[in-house]
Amino acid sequence: MQRETKRVDPYDTRSGTGILGRMSDILTRQGHNVASFSVDRFSVALVGQPGESDSPMIVDRNGVPQVHLDDTNEYLFGLHNSTEKDSGSFAETWSSSLIESLGINNLLLAKLEGINTQAEFPNTYLGDNLETVARLIATRESRGSDVDTFYVEIGGFDTHADVEEALNSRFSEVNGGFEAFAQEMKNINIWNNVTLIQASDFARTLNPNGGDGTDHAWGGNYMMMGGSVKGGKILGKYPDDITEDGPLTLGKGRMIPSTPWDAVFRGIASWVGIGEGDMLDVCPNIHNFNSSFLIDPNEMFGQVIIPPSPAPTETLPTGSPSVSPSDPPIPTKSPTTSPSTSPTKAIDPPSTSPTKSPSKNTSPTKSPSSNETNDPTPGPTSRPTDTPFCQDEEDYFFLGDTTKDCAWVLKKWERRCEKRDTRPGFDSLVLEHCRVSCGTCACANDNWLFQNEVGKDCEWVGKKSDRRCGKTGALDNCRASCDIPCCGDNPDFRYDEDPEKDCFWVAKKSERRCVKDGVDKQCLQACGKCDL
């Protein structure tokens, strides 16, 4: 579960990557200089797609240790130089990684030398971690970085016994570390560009066990802070009924969460300048949640005060500082469990609805709109934006009855999806409005032809999707060819009304469970229907 918290990709659609690494990839494509650091350990949270971003650097909680090679130093570079035409690729890669890591180690060591914090950090494990993060942030200009991300971790919260004593100790360490870090960020005038988020893989039961402790549970809390964070409030929905009979209670004080991890990281991604068109790359599972499960980024963040972008004075090699080949190189980015300085280039997030007149910015867009504009764009676009995936219409009510929405349809979808809504000027089948509930999502329109020209169908679009997906009608009719989600699982579906048998349960044994009555119409992604 800890790994999944760092990845936020339950269906493994972006295999091997982490939530922060995917943000890094997008920001790197936008032209940012992104650097990331994991303190005292490797973290999959920072892993992006190979070759997209620079690899993260793993540093010690007390900074960057000096490497002592003594008598071997004068021979080291000669030994690891390419000496033969037929030198093996594995040996060359190993040598390259070693030399690169040593170069990073020496450069970071030099940058951190003489960097001291003004705030006094507590002498704790978390305090040491956050002090190192603060010192690294202070070197951002000399490193030429306009976006930094960091990951730190502490344990000790598995409180099956003596929960009160354990939490008093843990909270004291967290509070002391956070307080000192926030003060130091204010001292160096960067607090408004820093966001710190605390995350955990699960929560604790509300009811105690027999050992004065608590056991594993589901719904829990995240904490987030920063100069741009609209703090002092709780977002999300608090359960109306926490008794054993409550609709979100699983028993023994375990609560079903009502806010997904994706909601929090979507807000952070928006804050650092990632638009909705790229949000599916950041949170691949977000299309399974409608707006009622998500949080408006404007509720999370105020205005960001962005300092000027520093001119690089020295470039850090990529890789992880160590004396031997380090963990696999991994791209990184975005605020992690520990703070990050946010982009120092001003980025205006895209609006969620079209404007009535074209913007004044005449630079080429990174992704085309799905509708035709009156004027041509200044240059070719590179990839399509995401348009809403197949979903139920939130404001649809059968025959105008406000009690008969798509959730009502789902309860008896076999009969209700085929009903016709006969209101004047509204003559249509229910399945046209409740597409997820009725299982009528489609990845491609086999009858569509671009400008009605024979041969210009979705297969034709897919052959040169980078250019053709921007053509009128292509995104709406050829979503699969344009690599855009066309359907998803129904988050409200429960097989046999069992609260534990949702589409994620279906996906675990899809071969057997998708053939059960009606399952493949509700769990389209889990049953592989989205790939058809």
Image: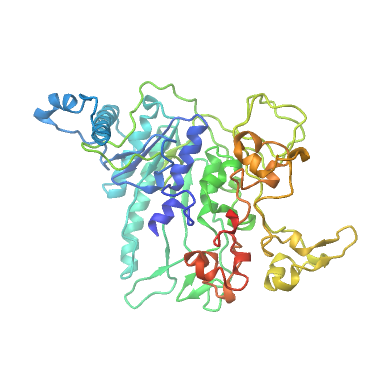
Q: Residue at x 55, y 79 (%)?
A: 245
At a point 11% along the width and 29% down the height, the residue shown is 72
Dividing the picture into quadrants, the one containing residue 364 is top right
Point out the residue furthest to the left here.
71
- Considering depth in this image, is 193 or 470 the residue closer to the camera? 470
In the displayed structure, does residue 19 sit left or right of residue 143? right
Q: Is residue 168 left or right of residue 49?
A: left
| Side of 82 relative to 450 (left or right) | left
Q: Position of residue 108 (x, y in %)?
A: 29, 30
Q: Quadrant of the C terminus?
A: bottom right
Whether residue 294 is visible: no
Hey, which quadrant is residue 110 in on the image?
top left
Q: Looking at this rendering, what residue extends furthest in the front direction?
A: 454
Residue 15 lies left or right of residue 474; in this view the side is left
**Residue 202: horizontal and vertical position, in percent?**
42, 62
Q: Position of residue 477 (x, y in %)?
A: 70, 47
Q: Which of the 4 quarters of the picture holds residue 115? A: top left
